[in-house]
Image: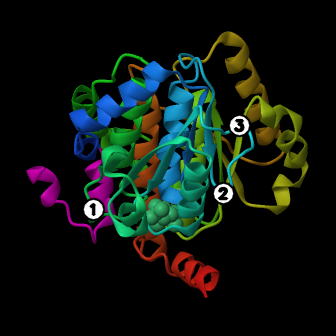
Amino acid sequence: MEELANVDPSDMAAMVASFPLMLKATTLSNEFLSEAIRIRNQGLDGICIVAMGGSAIAGEICKEILADSSEVPILCIREYILPKTVNRRWVVIAVSYSGNTEETIAAYKEANRRECSVFVLTTGGILNQISNDLRKHMLPPTFQPRAALPIILAGILPLLETLLNLEITNLPKLSVELAKKAAGWEQLPRSPKEMAHLLKGKIPLLIGWRHLIPVAYRAKCQFNENSKVFASISQIPEIYHNEIEGTRSCIDHPISPVFLRSQEEDEKTKMGIESAAAIFQENGCHPEHLNLRFDSRIEEALGFTMYLDMVSVRLAEILGVNPLSVERIAQMKRRLRD
Ligand code: PA5
């Protein structure tokens, strides 16, 4: 895709700004989709996505988006091993942007041993070498895995929708809508830069509800990897049963709760969030309510993701750290290998 070739892979801000473009950067081939239809027609008991880090999050987001429509369970596994329930009537989707992640390769091999129907999404590496061509989709390379989230999602979502016999999301249309929304964010009172300033010196606590739970997790990872800061997550309604009690120690810790507010919230959820926020406030924390207006569940999930990606890059700029380098992750991978 020509426009994507102009995106500088050494500029994280540019990659985040290209999020909408990346959503239409890959198209599954007819052969690959025919294979998915063939497996669907044979019948399947579940779908298990195996991936780590930046490659895993697209699967988590798709799982939540499809939660109301999928008639079979969708699991996202970040592990070397598969749950016992995953057997030959399951589809396994192994996703590794680099193709060299040892946990994903181990789970891929295990899925083959169990005679599951295994699909692969990658840009190369070992996974490319060892996988079946018919069920492999090559993603556009060049970017860091976490920056490539929209590209990975553009591979996983239509594959899942095909396997589940659901309407295929119009990603080019979504890309246009998202680009329009993002163009207005700099004018918001809580622009990404303003939000980054608010979070400076704090521990962001990202709080999501339903399809915004994996988005909160993604944002935590982006604060870790891009901004090199510690961050935490929670979810509605679970937070009412634990973290809320911990607010007693808010005064000693610079926690900054950020509630990701969905257009789909019902009255009970709204009331719960407002009550939780009030308890944070009373205990000395100042919660932020992030209200970004989107037209669909998937647009909301991806829009929040892009916005928070931008915040993490702006925070990196403010803190004077390089959002691209992941020295400690590379060191960890070397230690695991040696
Ligand atoms: O964002 C990153 O760079 C990491 O979280 C990687 O995604 C993670 O280490 C897994 O690698 P890969 O996505 O190549 O399988």
Residue bearing mark 3: 235
User: Element type at marker 3?
Assistant: strand
Q: Which of pointers 2 and 3 lies earlier in the amino acid sequence?
A: 2
For this view, does 220 lie left or right of residue 299?
A: right
Callout 1 crowding tier (Cα within 10 Å): few <14, some 14–19, many ≥20 = some
Counting from the top left corner in percent of width and height, residue 315 is at 47, 63
Q: Which structural element holds mark 1?
A: loop
Residue drawn at x 41%, y 39% as measured from the top left: 156
Residues at marks 2 and 3, CA–CA distance in whole angstroms: 22 Å
* Colouring scheme, one of rainbow, by chain, secondary structure, one colour: rainbow
Give the residue type at disc 1: Pro
Question: In which image quadrant can residue 134 be found?
Answer: top left
Question: Which residue sits at x=23%, y=39%?
Answer: 27
Badge 2 amino acid: Glu
Residue 315 visible in image: no
In this picture, residue 3 sits left or right of residue 139: left
Residue 2 placed where, x, y %? 9, 52
Q: Is residue 285 magenta?
A: no
**Residue type at the position of mark 3:** Gln
The quadrant of the rendering that contains the C terminus is bottom right
* Mark 1 Cβ inside 8 Å of ligand 1: no
Q: Which mark is residue 141?
A: 1
Residue found 74% across the figure and 48% down from its top: 285
**Please, is residue 124 above or below residue 23 in the view?**
below
- Lower sequence index among marks 1 and 2: 2
Q: Nearer the viewer, mark 1 or mark 2?
A: 2
Q: Vertically, is 298 above or below 197?
A: above
State which tag comes first along the sequence, 3 or 1.
Answer: 1
Q: Which mark is residue 79?
A: 2
Residue interval drawn in magenta: 1-19
Q: Horizontal placement of 269 versus 116: left or right?
A: right
* Residue lying at 35% horizontally and 41% vertically, measured from the top left: 155
